Amino acid sequence: MAVIGGKPTSPKASKGKGGIRTDISPEIYFYSRWEANVARLFTHLRMSWEYAPTSFDIGRQMYTPDFYLPETDMYIEVKNFMWTYSKIRDEKFRTAYPNIPLLVILKVDYMELERRYTHLIPRWEYKNSKVPNPGGGY
C-alpha cells in the first residue's frame, strides 16, 4: 500500500501535526489537523475529493495543492496564513496556470468552517487533540 503525502515542500509545512488518520484513509498522510479536518468536511458534505493528486511545475520548483475537487474542477490549498514563501508560490502558480481554479482556505475561513461544522463531524481535531501516530490511528 503506497502512502500519499508525507513530503512537505514548504519550509513551514513541517510544523503541522502530520500523520495518517485512519478514520479518513489508511493511505493518506496529512501534514496537519486542518488538512485532515477539511477532508472530513468534504466527506461529510458528500463532496468527492482527492488529496494532492497533481504537482504543477512553477519554474524551478513543483507545487502540489492540498486537494482537488473533481466535481467542480477546483484545487484547494489549506493555509494558516500566507508566509512570503507561500505568497510567491501562489503568485507563480496563478501566473503559470491562470485557467486552473485554486481556492486558498486561510485561518479566518477555516475557523468559520470549524464553527459551523465541528459539532456534526466525528473525530474533528482541535489544537490540543492527540497527535496522530504516523503509522496510523491516534
Image (cartoon, rainbow, N blue to C red):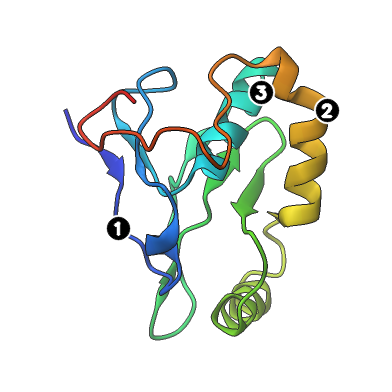
Badge 2 amino acid: Arg
* Residue 42 picture location, percent across and down: 64, 27
* Residue 68 picture location, percent across and down: 57, 42
Quick one: label 2, few (<14), some, or many (20+) residues within 10 Å? few
In the image, residue 78 sits, relative to residue 56, either above or below, namely above
* Residue 107 picture location, percent across and down: 72, 55
Instruction: For the C terminus, give its image quadrant.
Output: top left
In the image, residue 59 sits, relative to residue 123, either above or below, namely below
Disc number at residue 7? 1
Quick one: label 3, few (<14), some, or many (20+) residues within 10 Å? some
N-term mark: 3 or 1: 1
Judge depth for marks 3 and 1 and give the one in front: 1
Q: Which residue is mark 3?
A: 47
Of 28 and 47, the residue lying toward us: 28
Disc number at residue 116? 2
Report the residue at 65% width, 16% height from top.
Answer: 121
How many dots with numbers? Answer: 3
Report the residue at 30% width, 23% height from top.
Answer: 137
- Please give left or right for residue 77 compared with residue 13 in the image: right
